[in-house]
């Protein structure tokens, strides 16, 4: 099932349903050469170009009224190098296919986000991440990139080759070129033991530093209008494998997390007054469980309930204050928030515009059910996040612009200078990039 909905007359919508675009034409290249030719042809016709993956971004980062490049034919593994422990994969490959193919080869990424519907290039270009004490975003696991630049030439980069491009293009926002292949670091497949358990909000905040330090991957969900959270710790395990049983898995992951949750969202959207009661019930419905499996089966889970999301990275030491402020804002307001708030962490990395660039970070994600008015909640949350010098996820709802980013990203100018060099005519420009990178 493609998450990208193409409607009548070439209308494109994103997964969350909050972005619509009408490209002048769509191209589905079957090779890097065809993609490069499409970029050159766009230049001749005076059109801008954007590549679009599965539309899982909530911003208009992939929207264009020019040429829309669909990468669904640029998929599959090009090469596995067991000496270097890397895998090179075509840019349009869905993460799900990559994870399954690697598992068959006895390999795995070190860390990943919590869904795997996106293409590898869409996920990395927007800075998609999971949670980790020592291991960082998907882009931080990149060892090499191939991209088609504005003049239609193919550029490769790594730490040794074009290192200044490599520093920026791992999370390039589609501004530096169109990524055609990515080389990831991989490792022999391993087992993770997940321990999920409810925990009071105040206790999680009081013990946050220990919970973070004692676990390789720690995250939690807070249910607004309650003092409850559900925590999840993933740590490497010697085994044996103990996957979630099929019936229990269906009940907890499909029935509760997608089925009942979907109905609860419909009820909450129709009768907002019921939301706090639903939240109390939801937060109590999830019981503790422990299971052991290969990484992608532990890190990722299906997300069938559609929503709109805002997520900010704040300095890790600012997390507890940020969450206390968020909770008191919700408690004081007339808002009815039916979606849990997700909290994760990442270590500092060296990618120019990574949300964790140069600082240990904690992520706070707020969601609203698709079709529910989200502006009031997101605006109030964003005010709290920006007061802590938060950096918004590039693929999630935010209102920040280049002036703000120049303040919260010390290397912002490095990125825009490189963009001036690689794309002087702004072939890859769109309204979103104009706002976040400046004209």
Image (cartoon, grey):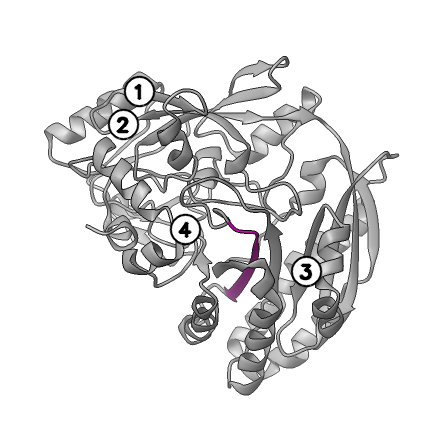
Q: Which residue is mark 3?
A: 220
Instruction: Name the N-terminal-most of marks 2 and 3.
Output: 2
Instruction: Name the N-terminal-most of marks 1 and 4.
Output: 1
Question: Farthest left residue?
Answer: 45
Left or right: 97 as drawn, with respect to 411: right
Q: Is residue 352 magenta?
A: no
Check if mark 2's residue and mark 1's residue have beta carbons within 8 Å: yes
Residue 47 visible to the viewer: yes
The numbered mark at residue 154 is: 1
The numbered mark at residue 394 is: 4
Q: Which residue is mark 2?
A: 149
**C-alpha separation, residue under disc 3 versus residue under disc 4:** 22 Å
Image coordinates for residue 318, horizontal then vertical, percent: 57, 65
The majority secondary structure of the magenta stretch comes to strand
Left or right: 245 as drawn, with respect to 3: right
Check if mark 2's residue and mark 3's residue have beta carbons within 8 Å: no
**C-alpha separation, residue under disc 2 versus residue under disc 1:** 6 Å
Residue at 83% x, 50% y is 290
Image coordinates for residue 156, horizontal then vertical, percent: 37, 21
């Amino acid at each position: 099932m493609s998450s990208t909905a193409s409607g009548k007359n070439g209308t494109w919508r994103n997964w969350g349903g909050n972005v619509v675009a009408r490209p002048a034409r769509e191209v589905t290249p079957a090779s890097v050469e065809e993609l490069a030719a499409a970029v050159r042809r766009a230049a001749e016709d005076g059109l801008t170009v954007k590549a679009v993956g599965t539309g899982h971004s909530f911003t208009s980062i992939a929207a264009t009224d020019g040429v829309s490049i669909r990468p669904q034919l640029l998929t599959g593994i090009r090469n596995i190098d067991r000496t270097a422990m890397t895998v090179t994969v075509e840019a349009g490959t869905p993460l799900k296919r990559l994870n399954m193919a690697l598992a068959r080869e006895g390999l795995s990424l070190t860390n990943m986000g919590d869904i795997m519907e996106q293409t590898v290039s869409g996920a990395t270009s927007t800075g998609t991440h999971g949670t980790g004490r020592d291991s960082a975003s998907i882009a931080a696991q990149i060892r090499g990139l191939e991209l088609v630049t504005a003049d239609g030439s193919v550029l490769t980069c790594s730490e040794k080759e074009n290192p200044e491009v490599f520093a920026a293009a791992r999370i390039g926002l589609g501004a530096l070129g169109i990524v055609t292949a990515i080389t990831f670091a991989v490792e022999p497949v391993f087992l993770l033991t997940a321990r999920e358990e409810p925990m009071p909000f105040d206790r999680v905040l009081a013990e946050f530093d220990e919970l973070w330090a004692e676990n390789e991957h720690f995250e939690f969900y807070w249910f607004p209008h309650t003092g409850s959270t559900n925590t999840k710790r993933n740590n490497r395990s010697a085994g044996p494998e103990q996957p979630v049983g099929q019936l229990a898995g269906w009940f907890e992951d499909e029935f509760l997390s997608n089925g009942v949750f979907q109905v609860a969202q419909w009820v909450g959207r129709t009768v907002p007054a019921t939301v706090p009661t639903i939240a109390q019930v939801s937060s109590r419905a999830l019981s503790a469980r422990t299971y052991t499996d290969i990484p992608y089966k532990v890190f990722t889970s299906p997300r069938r309930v559609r929503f709109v999301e805002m997520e900010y990275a704040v300095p890790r030491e600012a997390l507890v204050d940020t969450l206390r402020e968020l909770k008191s804002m919700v408690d004081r307001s007339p808002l009815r928030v039916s979606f849990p708030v997700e909290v994760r962490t990442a270590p500092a990395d060296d990618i120019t515009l990574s949300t964790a660039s140069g600082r240990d970070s904690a992520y706070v994600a707020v969601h609203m059910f698709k079709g529910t008015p989200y502006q009031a909640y997101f605006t109030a949350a964003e005010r709290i996040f920006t007061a802590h010098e938060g950096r918004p996820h590039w693929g999630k709802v935010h209102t920040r612009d280049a002036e703000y980013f120049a303040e919260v990203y010390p290397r912002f100018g490095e990125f825009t200078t490189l963009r001036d060099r690689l794309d002087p005519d702004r072939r890859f420009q769109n309204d979103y990039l104009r706002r976040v990178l400046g004209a």
